[in-house]
Structures are given as C-alpha cells and as structure tokens.
Image (spheres, rainbow, N blue to C red):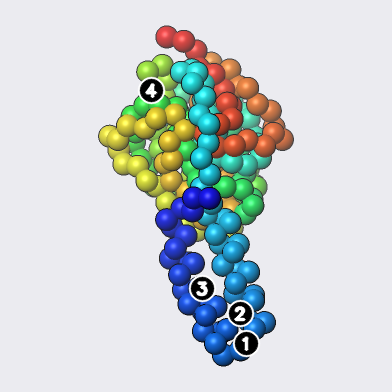
C-alpha cells in the first residue's frame, strides 16, 4: 500500500532505533518501538480511491464520521457546513471535493481542542482552501485537534485540482469541514462514515 511521504520523518528514526535496541538485546523495547513504527505506517497509508465521474458530485474531503450538517452564514454567504471527524484509525489524506482552481489558501492560528467538539470549526488552528469550479465554489477547512498539530497543504493559490485529488493531510486525529452552497443537495446524514475522494456527500445545482 502507498504510504504518504510525510511518514518517513517519523519512520526512519524509529527503524534505526529498532535496530539499535535489537543489537543491544533489549527485545521488549525493540518490540514496542517496532509496534509504534507499524502504527505510524498504518496511520500514513494513502490508498487509491475510485473517483465518481458525475461532474456535479461533491466528494468527501476526508475519511471519517459525519458529525454535523448545518446551515451557516459566513461573510454574507449562505452555506451548508459538513463536519467530518477523523479518528487516528482513519486515512488522514485530504482530497478536493470538486474540480476547479484554488482561489484562496488561508492559515488561521488557534487552539488545539479535541476535534470532535463542534466549536473547533471556529476556534482551532486550521488551514482553509477555497476551490472554485464551473458551477460553484466550495471551501475545505483542515482543522487541527487535540493531538493533531501538524497541518500539511499540498496546494497553493492559483493551482488547479481535479475532483478527489490529494490536497494535503492532517497528522494524528483531526477534523475536516466542507462548506457548500446552500442549494447543494446533501447526500449523506450525521453518523455516516465517508471515504475521502469516493463518497458523494452532495450534488451541486447545474448551471
């Protein structure tokens, strides 16, 4: 299975530590370190996904459990916010919900509250990407949690992305919000488990 490149900064020192502990015959410590190494590799897994062909489909920006689906008003725009909580057992690669151009990337300092709390969408450290497609503009918020304190964004303003394309990751438990136009037809419900890049969470209105 493919492993995200961000894993190796953790894995390589751990592999060296396992080898050193083993050479010293500290087998218990070596076993524990090996277990941590395997977990890191598992956490940073990056599986391929089947991306829907529907041009009006909005796909999940992350794997995880849907915690909120609610109407909001942000900057005068009426939107629907879908909040997805990622446990440490979910794939943490973020993907673009639609095809389009990245028209804004905004980093926001903040707190590190537990990601399952509703308030983290406003209060926690986060990185927000605005993606403008042919029929609509959506926003993805990569939100740090209690443990996740490293947000990685692969894209810059002005770049184009395809639906389901990898746009970044959040390390070790987090939350991802997707903000949609209010007239988008939501296809999922609170409690559903979604898969980034493949689960259709909404459909946009045609031009």
Label whose residue precedes the other's in the sequence (3 or 1): 3
Q: Which mark is residue 79?
A: none
Q: Which mark is residue 30?
A: 2
Q: Which mark is residue 26?
A: 1
Name the residue carrying label 3. 14
Q: Secondary structure at mark 1?
A: loop
Q: Nearer the viewer, mark 2 or mark 4?
A: 2
Q: Could you tell me residue 189's position as x and y percent?
A: 68, 28
Q: CA distance from mark 3 to mark 1?
A: 15 Å
Residue at the image position 49 percent from the left and 67 percent from the top: 11
The residue lying toward the viewer, choosing from 134 and 117, is 134
Q: Nearer the viewer, mark 1 or mark 4?
A: 1
Residue at the image position 36 percent from the left and 26 percent from the top: 100
Q: CA distance from mark 2 to mark 3?
A: 10 Å
Q: CA distance from mark 2 to mark 1?
A: 6 Å
Label whose residue precedes the other's in the sequence (4 or 3): 3
- Is residue 54 visible in the rendered structure shown here? yes
Q: Could you tell me residue 65's position as x and y percent?
A: 66, 40
Residue at the image position 39 percent from the left and 30 percent from the top: 162
């Amino acid at each position: 299975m493919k492993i995200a490149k961000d894993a190796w900064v953790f894995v390589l020192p751990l592999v060296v530590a396992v080898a050193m502990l083993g050479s010293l015959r500290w087998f218990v410590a070596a076993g524990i370190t090996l277990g941590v190494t395997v977990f890191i590799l598992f956490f940073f897994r990056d599986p391929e996904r089947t991306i829907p062909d529907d041009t009006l489909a909005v796909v999940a920006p992350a794997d995880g459990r849907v915690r909120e689906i609610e109407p909001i008003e942000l900057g005068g725009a009426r939107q629907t916010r879908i909040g997805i909580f990622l446990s440490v057992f979910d794939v943490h690669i973020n993907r673009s919900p639609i095809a389009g151009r990245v028209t804004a990337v905004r980093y926001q300092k903040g707190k590190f509250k537990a990601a399952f709390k509703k308030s983290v969408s406003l209060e926690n450290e986060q990185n927000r990407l605005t993606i403008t497609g042919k029929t609509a503009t959506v926003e993805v918020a990569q939100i740090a949690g209690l443990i996740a304190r490293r947000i990685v964004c692969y894209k810059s303003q002005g770049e184009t992305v395809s639906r389901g394309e990898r746009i970044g990751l959040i390390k070790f438990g987090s939350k991802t919000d997707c903000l949609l136009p209010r007239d988008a037809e939501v296809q999922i419900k609170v409690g559903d488990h979604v898969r980034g890049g493949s689960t259709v969470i909404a459909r946009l209105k045609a031009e």
